[in-house]
Amino acid sequence: MSTFDGLSVDMSSLHRLSNAKSRSISAENFTGEKGKAGMATEGNGASCARNLGRGWKVSPSVPIAPGATFTLADIKGPGAIQSIWMAGQYHPRFNILRIYWDDQEQPSVECPVGDFFCNGWGKYAQLTSLAVCMNPGRGAFNCYWTMPFRKRARITITNIHTEPMTWYYQINYALGPVSDDAAYFHAQFRRVNPLQYKKVYTIVDGIKGKGHYAGTYMAWGVNNNGWWGEGEIKFYLDGDCPPGKDVAEHGGDAFPTICGTGTEDYFCGCYNFDIPGKGYQEYCTPYAGMFQVIRPDGLYVANTRFGMYRWHIPDPVRFDTDLKITIQAIGWRSEGRYLANQDDIASVAFWYQTLPTAPFPKLPSRDELEVI
């Protein structure tokens, strides 16, 4: 019988014993050390617990000042992060999550917290899926991506807002040997507003190494009337789009290995996400959904906005050397032809790969990140 390490667990392996050691980091145990949780004598809850004493929710959260970076976790490996829960006063694009693996200076995850947990528009929407959940009340962020590391895992959050925030978090992980074939979790954010006319939107580019693509979140704001989701998603694998070559939509001669049939099709819907007579229909499934529709209100909310996800858990897209992914913004004209839309599009690409992590594009400025 094969050895079970217990670092990555699902229903089929939940019954199996393991030598992995369970640990958890929060404001009640900043280091995750065994037998050291709930010992705080001061913290954000000290006043509330003043008549109860030590061990009675003295430090449930941390304050993060404007411009400050707080280290949520700094863990010595080997091991794997198994789940993350977060909540607090936040602005969806003004709290930046970064994760660093094995002493790299380059983060492998760099993303606004709201978008990382699939709520980039700053308006609560229930999301129920295998990899990410967004739950009541004002927004409880949860993810269940397995994130193995061999030497070190460091997680930070930066407050780029002008106001302080209070942050709650729980990072559950296990310590134990990591298999030789375990890759490292990555997530990259991008936003373009508006997309240039007749340009394709790049979900991710510049990935170098061996790995597999695991999923996509998109916050899509439509700037045109009419149906907007005719665009094809395209996966350029292992030399399909070498440096210096342009994709076919730009007049180049680089063509993908995988090409979708439409935006709603990629997110496992069809025919405009529309139930005749009812309009857009939100849905959540374990692997895909169009779970959020922000509709115009006739006053200040002028355009329709969507939140969509697609997890490649049963069908990861494998690559050996490099990966680039684009998606078109195509609308539909009444006379039966396509329109190249100029929409407000943001995305998070999720994937696993070998190290080192290639440098990410610089995050947009605070004003460019803002949801308006």
Image: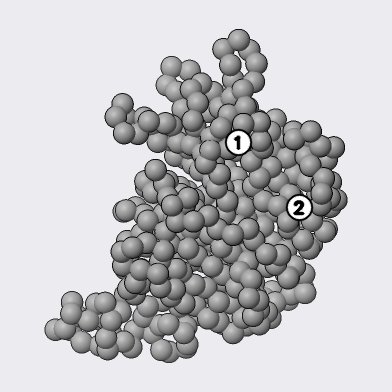
Point 63% across, 66% down: residue: 108
Image position of 152 with respect to 323: above or below: below
Instruction: Name the quarter where the C terminus is drawn.
Output: top left
Question: Which numbered disc, 2 or 1, marks the residue that appears first in the sequence?
Answer: 1
Point 52% across, 73% down: residue: 155
The quadrant holding residue 114 is: bottom left
Image position of 214 with respect to 222: above or below: below
The amino acid sitting under disc 1 is: Gln
Left or right: residue 365 compared with residue 208: left
The amino acid sitting under disc 2 is: Leu
Q: Is any part of residue 155 visible from this angle?
A: yes
Instruction: Provide the residue designation for mark 2.
Output: 323
Left or right: residue 363 compared with residue 237: left
**How many numbered discs sit on the rendered protein?**
2
Q: Is any part of residue 11 visible from this angle?
A: no
Please, what secondary structure does the residue beneath circle 2 have? Answer: strand
